[in-house]
Image (cartoon, rainbow, N blue to C red):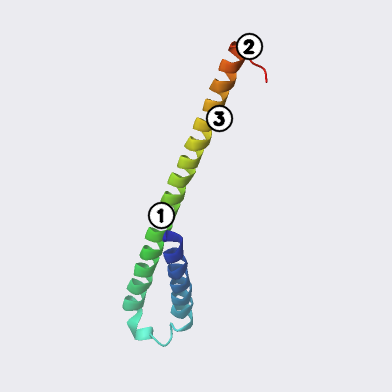
Amino acid sequence: MFVRSGHLNNHFFTYSSLGFLCLIFQYFNNEKYEAERYDKILGVYEQKSVKTLTSLAWLNWGQNFIFSAGLTAIMVLASQGIMAGKSD
């Protein structure tokens, strides 16, 4: 969900930055407005990027926790089997 909106904002960011650079002479008298609009677009892009990276970090943490818990459980069961003398 965040990635999809990030892609949309990335497209909007790219279009706006190119438009900002290519059409600067057309909006010569409107520099302040264009700079504020560009800053706003960059702010939205930054917020979406942070949200995406945060969700991916939580996903990574969750996957590491599940893997580590499973590996620990397997090691405990294996050590109990060895202590009981089972070596199947």
Q: Position of residue 80 (x, y in %)?
A: 56, 16
Q: Secondary structure at mark 1?
A: helix
Mark 1 to mark 2 CA distance (whole Å): 52 Å
Q: Amino acid at mark 1?
A: Val
Q: Please identify, in this view, whether the residue under mark 2 or under mark 3 is nearer the observer.
A: 2
Q: Position of residue 2 (x, y in %)?
A: 42, 60
Q: Nearer the viewer, residue 49 or 64?
A: 64
- Mark with earlier residue (2, 3): 3
Q: Nearer the viewer, residue 30 or 11?
A: 11
Q: Residues within 10 Å of mark 3 (few under 14, many from 20)?
A: few
Q: Quick check: 76 above or below 41?
A: above
Mark 3 to mark 1 CA distance (whole Å): 31 Å
Write down the residue under mark 3.
Answer: 71
At a point 45% along the width and 52% down the height, the residue shown is: 53
Q: Please identify, in this view, whether the residue under mark 1 or under mark 2 is nearer the observer.
A: 2
Q: Nearer the viewer, residue 46 or 33?
A: 46
